[in-house]
Image: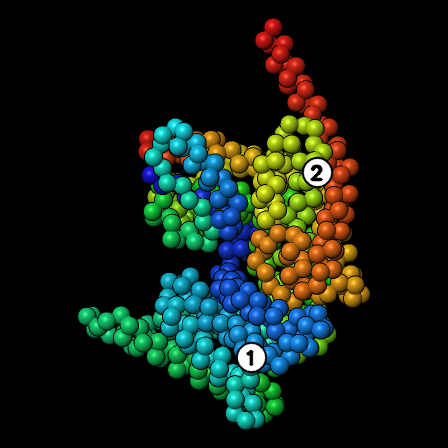
Amino acid sequence: MKITLLCALGMSTSLLVERMKKVANEREINVEIEAYSADDIDKHVETANVILLGPQIRYKKNELFKKAKAANTPIEIIDMRAYGSTDGEKVLDQALDLMNYTREE
Amino acid sequence: MNGFNAFMERYFMPVAGKLAEQRHLKAVRDGIVAAMPLLIIGSIFLIISSPPIESWETFMEPYAPTLNIPVDATFGMLGLVAVFAISYSLANSYKMDGLSAGVLALAAFMVATPLTEEGDIPLNLMGAEGLFIAIVLAIFTVEVYRFFENRNIVIRMPEGVPPSVWRAFSALIPGAVIIFIVWGVDLLLTSSFDLSLHGIVSAVLRQPLEAMGGSFWGAMIAIILVHLLWSFGIHGISIVASVMAPIWYSLTDQNVAAQQAGEALPHVIGQPFMAIWWAVGGSGMALALTILFVWRARSKHLKGLGRGSIWASFFNISEPVIFGAPIVMNPLLFVPFILAPLAVGIITYFSMSLGIVGKPYVIVPWTTPPPFSGILTTGDWRGGVLMMVNLVVAMFIYYPFFRLYDKKLMEEEETNEQAAASKDV
């Protein structure tokens, strides 16, 4: 299972990645979490099980959502508050929910 | 407030999105980013070979020509690298062969470059002076190439021929046409009007854009725009830079050339001014606000946020504070968020143009923490002092707004606690 976070350069989301990994460890969930620049979406859209976007690049939503949908990878924008407070737990839940949701469909 | 937000979401966001997704602008940005490591490496040699301290400079003088070799080969090749990298990115975005496009654009660029009287390649036109024609020719090459591919006017190889072989053949016809057009146009300009493609692009594109982008007002408008965008939660600098980056790099390269030649630096505005100087702690001089959070906040939320994000802020990453405080859609904080960098921009601009502090000519990674970034970009210890002064000024501007917001949060926290306590009873 692989969660990919994308933001402008993959810098600020990488802070979040560390928090999410910690929570995943505590809960003993086997998950790979990584952060990249949104410009590299083409490289990650196929391998990721779920993609989350930093809220600051939501102006690129159309382009990025289109690419993710084409690859059948669920995608969502990270909740702004959770992003700001680098709430790893909340964002991890968001990713897990998003995956379950699409699995049920 | 909500009405305004809705207005921005509805009308502004699509425009910002289009601008950021715009294929050609994106290719230009990617092309310049590809040259970034070279610019930083070149900068290191530049500080050593042409230091701003006079005694050191005299000492280094005999070694300068040798030390300038890596500077010329990195910083000085910005245009040459950009023409390849931009056409490569643009072709890839069309799912065309980037390598062929890059090679063709490189040749087109050389065709358009007038040689010196001795028949040598002029180094000055390979750098930022050639950056704008590099952009024009990279886009031209890929678009012509695409025109031929779309109409299937290429030499096709039978199946079973290795890709590197058919690639070379498929680029043959469009490549010949591209080179022929650029050569023909340049020849016509030179023989009939005594002009060159370099000269024309410089006159109609480069000089007016640089005059605009390099001016005080141009910089102030850019700063306001970046922070207005951030106030709505949009990555401001990446949008503004997608249009302005070539101009800022070109201005900086002129400073580099002047520093190498031992002349006075012509520009204050440029890449370091835009990436480092008014963005201490990230956009909005956010380090000033983060320090206030750690030092002065009484609400749990801001204190916690400050402690959690101070290190990121020290390395100029401001997203945690921008979204966590939040500054986004929060007039109590986004007013100083715009005012603080504006004030810092004005102070910095005048300190540099009046010669109190050296002008920036060195490119450092934008994550370089203050005050080192200030010292390194200008090569002047006073740059570090100015950066600290700027930080204090920003703290003063943030302070009253911060106090109001902190008080408001504290009251909310108290009400929540009381409510929780009364429930327990």
Task: In the rendered view, tell whether residue B322 sits above or below residue A27.
Answer: below
- Which residue shows up at 66% across the image and 35% down it? B294
Residue B138 placed where, x, y %? 48, 72
Residue B207 placed where, x, y %? 66, 74
Query: Which mark is nearer the camera, 1 or 2?
Result: 1
Question: What is the residue that sits farthest to the left in this orientation?
Answer: B160
Snapshot quadrant of residue B194: bottom right
Which amino acid lies under the numbered mark 2 shown in the image of this protein? Answer: Leu
Q: Nearer the viewer, residue B308 or B47?
A: B47
Q: Nearer the viewer, residue B43 or A94?
A: B43
- The answer to whether residue B222 is seen in the rendering is no
Answer with mark 1 or mark 2, whichever residue precedes in sequence: 1
Alpha carbons under labels 1 and 2: distance apart: 48 Å
Task: In the rendered view, tell whether residue B56 sits above or below residue A51.
Answer: below
Q: Give the residue pinned by disc 2.
A: B292
- Chain under callout 1: B
- Dot 2: element: helix
Which amino acid lies under the numbered mark 1 shown in the image of this protein? Answer: Thr
- Dot 1: element: helix
Q: Give the residue pinned by disc 1.
A: B66
- Chain under callout 2: B
* Quarter occupied by the C terminus of chain B: top right
B296 left or right of B21?
right
Q: Nearer the viewer, residue B192 or B112?
A: B112
B33 left or right of B277?
left
Residue A32 placed where, x, y %? 37, 40
- Which residue shows up at 72% across the image and 73% down it? B54
* Quarter occupied by the N terminus of chain B: top right
| Whether marks 1 and 2 lie on the same chain | yes
- Which residue shows up at 39% across the image and 46% down it? A68
Q: Residues within 10 Å of mark 1 (few under 14, many from 20)?
A: few
Residue A42 placed where, x, y %? 39, 53
